[in-house]
């Protein structure tokens, strides 16, 4: 499954954030086949639509979908000695599908900053420089190969050479591959290069508790946001330490705490949703009866493959999908009202799933 890897300089709050994630963790009883890896934090994806569906199509049980964060620092620390930590770090970043890059954006004289000064942009650049150098290295190596092939007028080689030559100067100037505009054909080539700075990034500014309700008030957060925009990335502000405390509270205390902080929900929810989106993940629902359940699929997935996420038999024997959109159910207020309005659709093999679809798959066994 797809996962977002947490990275950042030492002492910026990565472990604190990862602890918050694992404490808030998914109700493991709901996921009996989940593998348990200490570097993976599984969270439920908060989705208010589930409550509304349960209200309109009551089921015995409601099960949210899940999402995984990987603590790359944790993996690197556990890496066997002798091997360069640097290489291990890059190798682990290569394995994840998106990057959650944590930077320090809080003042606290008691917590040492590795460079002696709170400067989130310098922190980001320190890591991105490493990633950029690794990419530049890869691009140069590949260019050498492709240039030889391109002499033979191999069209694919020529196209790849053009893309690599577009990437190279950007990396040389400290930029990232993700900040470059590519057309569709170029994008396919870029994907095949597996470059670190082409992965989607979410910058997480670890702000102080005072800025939790409104990270925009933090001067550090604003800097991170500006940087993210130029980098073709996104930024959010989270108070990691406070999130860790919140994650330990039971539901009632949590509500009281959040109200006192003047926020509607834990910042962790924002992090989960932003990372989910970053990975191109969307949600469909199956509703009613024994359980109402949210399922995760990759944007662009067609109906039979979506059915296969529930069970491989569903994909093999796929006949059709009966679909209503969450918005229609929400507005019309009942399943039968959706039917009467002619908004219960019958979709075939080529149907591309839409976020919020409530589906009943029909299949042969
Ligand atoms: P890591 O090295 O990036 O994993 O950093 P840690 O999560 O271990 O955090 C380093 C130190 O900063 C710890 O002592 C944390 O308690 C502290 N810390 C983390 N987040 C915050 C925060 O939002 N505010 C304050 N004041 N301290 C924090």
Image (spheres, rainbow, N blue to C red):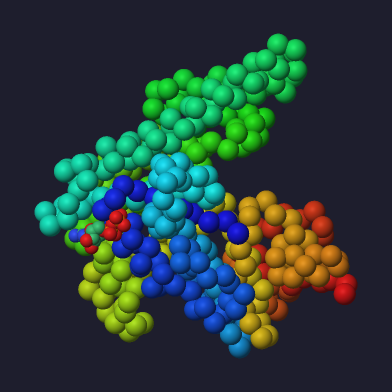
Quarter of the picture holding the C terminus: bottom right
Q: Residue at x 49, y 31 (%)?
A: 135
Quarter of the picture holding the N terminus: bottom right
Q: Which residue lies furthest to the top in this view?
A: 151
* Ligand 1 in which quarter: bottom left
Regarding residue 149, the answer to whether it shows in the image is yes
Q: Nearer the viewer, residue 53 or 107?
A: 107
223 sits left or right of 364 in the view: left
Q: Where is residue 60 in the image (x, y as percent from the top left)?
A: 61, 88
286 sits left or right of 19 in the view: right
Kindly indicate the quadrant of the structure image that contains residue 215.
bottom left
Q: Which of 167 and 79 is in front in this view?
A: 79
Q: Residue furthest bottom?
A: 60
Q: Which residue is drawn at 53% across and 36% down?
A: 195
Q: Position of residue 96 (x, y in %)?
A: 52, 50
Regarding residue 325, the answer to whether it shows in the image is no
Kindly indicate the quadrant of the structure image that contains residue 331.
bottom right
Kindly indicate the quadrant of the structure image that contains residue 116.
top left
Give the answer, above or below, for where 292 lies relative to 107: below
Q: Position of residue 94 (x, y in %)?
A: 52, 44
Give the answer, above or below, for where 199 lies relative to 43: above
Q: Which residue is drawn at 40% across and 72% down?
A: 24
Q: Where is residue 123 in the image (x, y as percent from the top left)?
A: 29, 41
């Amino acid at each position: 499954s797809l996962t977002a890897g947490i990275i950042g300089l030492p002492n910026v709050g990565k472990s604190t954030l990862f602890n918050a994630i694992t404490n808030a963790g998914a109700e493991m009883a709901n996921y009996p086949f989940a593998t348990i890896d200490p570097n993976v934090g599984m969270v439920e994806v908060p989705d208010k639509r589930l409550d509304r569906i349960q209200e309109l199509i009551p089921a015995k049980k409601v099960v949210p979908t899940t999402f995984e964060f990987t603590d790359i620092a944790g993996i690197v620390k556990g890496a066997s000695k002798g091997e360069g930590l640097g290489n291990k770090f890059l190798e682990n970043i290569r394995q994840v599908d998106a990057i959650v890059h944590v930077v320090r954006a809080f003042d606290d004289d008691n917590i040492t900053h590795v460079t002696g000064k709170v400067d989130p942009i310098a922190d980001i650049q320190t890591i991105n420089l490493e990633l950029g150098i690794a990419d530049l290295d890869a691009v140069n190596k590949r260019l050498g190969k492709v240039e030889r092939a391109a002499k033979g007028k191999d069209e694919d080689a020529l196209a790849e050479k053009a893309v690599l030559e577009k990437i190279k100067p950007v990396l040389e100037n400290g930029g990232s591959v993700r900040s470059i505009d590519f057309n569709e054909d170029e994008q396919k080539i870029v994907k095949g290069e597996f470059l670190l700075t082409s992965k989607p990034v979410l910058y997480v500014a670890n702000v102080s508790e005072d800025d939790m309700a409104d990270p925009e008030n933090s001067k550090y957060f604003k800097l991170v946001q500006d940087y993210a925009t130029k980098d073709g990335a996104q930024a959010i502000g989270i108070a990691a330490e406070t999130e860790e405390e919140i994650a330990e509270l039971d539901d009632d205390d949590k509500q009281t705490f959040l109200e006192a902080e003047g926020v509607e929900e834990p910042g962790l929810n924002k992090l989960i949703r932003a990372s989910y989106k970053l990975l191109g993940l969307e949600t469909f629902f199956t509703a009613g009866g024994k359980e109402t359940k949210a399922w995760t699929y990759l944007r662009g997935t067609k109906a039979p493959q979506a059915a296969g996420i529930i069970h491989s038999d569903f994909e093999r024997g796929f006949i059709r999908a009966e679909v209503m959109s969450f918005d229609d159910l929400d507005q019309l207020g009942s399943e039968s009202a959706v039917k009467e309005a002619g908004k219960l659709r019958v979709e075939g093999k080529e149907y591309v799933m839409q976020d919020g679809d409530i589906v009943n798959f029909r299949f042969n066994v």
